[in-house]
Image: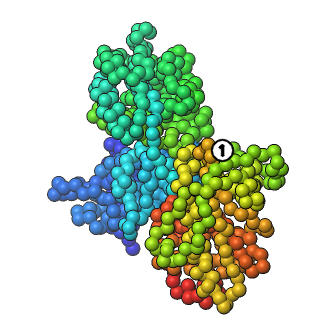
Amino acid sequence: MTTSWTIKVKGITGEILKVQAVHGADTTILVLKEQIKEHHDMHPPAHRQRLVFHKPDSTDVKLEDLNSKLSSYDGLTDGSTLVLVVLNRFVFYVSGLDGKIHEVEIPSSTPKDYLVADLCTLLEKEFKHNLSKYQILFRKEPLEIIRHGKEMRLKDFSLKSSDNLHITELGITITVVNPQIDLCFLVDCTGSMQSHIDAVNNCIKVVQHDLVQEFQGCDIRFAFVRYTDYDQPHSSRTTYIDFTKSQSDFYSFVDEIIAEGGKDGPEDVMGGLQTTFGHLTWGDEDVIKVMVHVADAPCHGSQYHSLNDDYPDGDPAGITHDQMMEKVAMNDIQYWFSFIEPDITDKMIQIFNESLKQVSDQRLLIRQITAKKPEEMGEAVKRSVMNSVYGAEITRRSKMKPCKVDTNCPDWDPIAEMKGKRTTSLPIKSMEDLQGGLVVEPPATDICFKCAPYPFAEGEECLVYHGYDVTRTKKVVLKKYKREGEEFNKLDCYMKETKVRIITNTYTQSFTKKLKPQSSLQIVVNPLEIVRCEGSQQIYMLEPFLIGNIEKFNNNAGMVSCKPKESDTMQALSHYSWVSSGKSMLICDLQGVSLHSVVTLTDPAIHSMTPGGYGFTDHGPNGIKRFFKTHKCGVTCKQMGLSDHLP
């Protein structure tokens, strides 16, 4: 029978806890930590506990291996005392998908060693959404799960707590040019804050230099709002310098500030916020607006803290946090709180945040970043602004246009002709040609065409329009990406679609030859041309109009349809493309019209070893993995020997 141990733990309040390790020497560190958490609500979860054993020889041992047993530590016995150290939360602010910002905590005592693959799983739970079609961006770089066989960890990307991550469609790259930034410092300037006030002044030149280096054509204005408390004269309790591009004017204002006042714990935070929104001339909607709030004390009102407060009922002027958070949302301000004493200010920020999330539908969130030491101020400010700029750019590029759908074919007579250049139909390429590198010439052939005013269908990535090719007098289909932004209207993005068609056609021809004589089924790929309109930047994909019902055989997220009679062959085509390409790519999202033993495919997708390499529907190795997770080799796979080649 196992004899339980009593382990003494010096907790965060200084008291000695007696924790029963029911499995005695065989109790694991994880179980012990969970028991400590159960002992008192004030104790943090297991991943934020660090247990330290002070050995008899005066050396300290950290008990970090959660699966290790108490018996594995020399000198640790029944009745030993451990010291509990509380680790800071390691959080990311994650935006995307639902347009909201989510605070996500990494559940690990060694968060920098956390796998990116585990982060993806964590985010799927948070967003309640399969992220297989998306990527996670840190600033402008995607977080890779695996890089050349190595499982990537957070530390491989130099990620820090409070960094912003963005979930975007696969293939998006972010380049920010000519951003306009309004950066306001809202600073508690009472007696204890002089070193942080000086740090703000000292960091401005470096921050501006780094932002200009990061963002080409960066145009930045600075403002400073100083607030103290009600023990100061009304006329000087709150002062400010409005937004300016002049560093010398900014320096002159801040140089004259002397930290003073604040006889009780809380300060006049509400007065500072009211000045920020009532007196500063913030830029228009195209300007990225950032407020960095630096404080070591909360606002007045006992609901925000447990300090001695001369005004426990709240702000003496009657200003409420709800009113101020409405101003934040109305002005679309990115609110960053640089904490110095988090134990004192956390409750205030939590209340502010609940209000801000409600009034902005969680589109905005107060994000916290450490500035405990004055020398950390420059890094905190730079990270705050950079994260805000990248976040604003990603949000802008991810907005979809409102879509009205009209399934009727229009009367072409009143619709104006459009002129442009189109790509020419390319000959079928051999496998040898593909291995030599595929080059697609840009649009160069004249074309006149008409496009319906509204799409008749909407796909995952594209809007689909009825069209009429005036030059060749035939009905066609026109498609364009449905998301706004330069990233989605580049010729290169559309040309990738042409490459997908050519590659799919080449593999399909090879596959069909190998089918015979077992099958008389013929598979062809609907040809695609790219049209660039004259006098505008609009680009379309043009293809012949298919008559008949579109059958879906599989998609690019692992779905397989068994209903169409050709499904077995189509799943084999996807499997064949992976084997024949040397396991470097897989053709999927197979759909088309079946008529008289001929299947005409349209809108295929390719998963490659580089996500986004073949457009926004290329989900990379994860896409290939998902295909084989649901794929079951049928008759055709077995006849062609494909069932012998599986991941």
Q: Which residue corresponds to mark 1?
A: 401
Q: Amino acid at mark 1?
A: Lys
Numbered disc 1: secondary structure: loop
Residue at x-position 42% and y-position 17%: 240
Q: Nearer the viewer, residue 215 or 232?
A: 215
Q: Nearer the viewer, residue 566 or 297?
A: 566
Q: Quadrant of residue 577?
A: bottom right
Residue 333 vertical placement versus 443 (above, below):
above
Residue at x-position 44% and y-position 9%: 234
Residue at x-position 41% and y-position 21%: 244
Answer whether residue 628 is visible to the viewer in this image.
no
Residue 50 vertical placement versus 512 (above, below):
above
- The percent position of residue 343, horizontal first and vertical second, equals 40, 36
Q: Quadrant of residue 529?
A: bottom right
- The percent position of residue 248, horizontal first and vertical second, equals 32, 20
- The percent position of residue 366, horizontal first and vertical second, equals 49, 36
Residue 330 vertical placement versus 594 (above, below):
above
- The percent position of residue 109, horizontal first and vertical second, equals 37, 54
Quadrant occupied by the N terminus:
bottom left
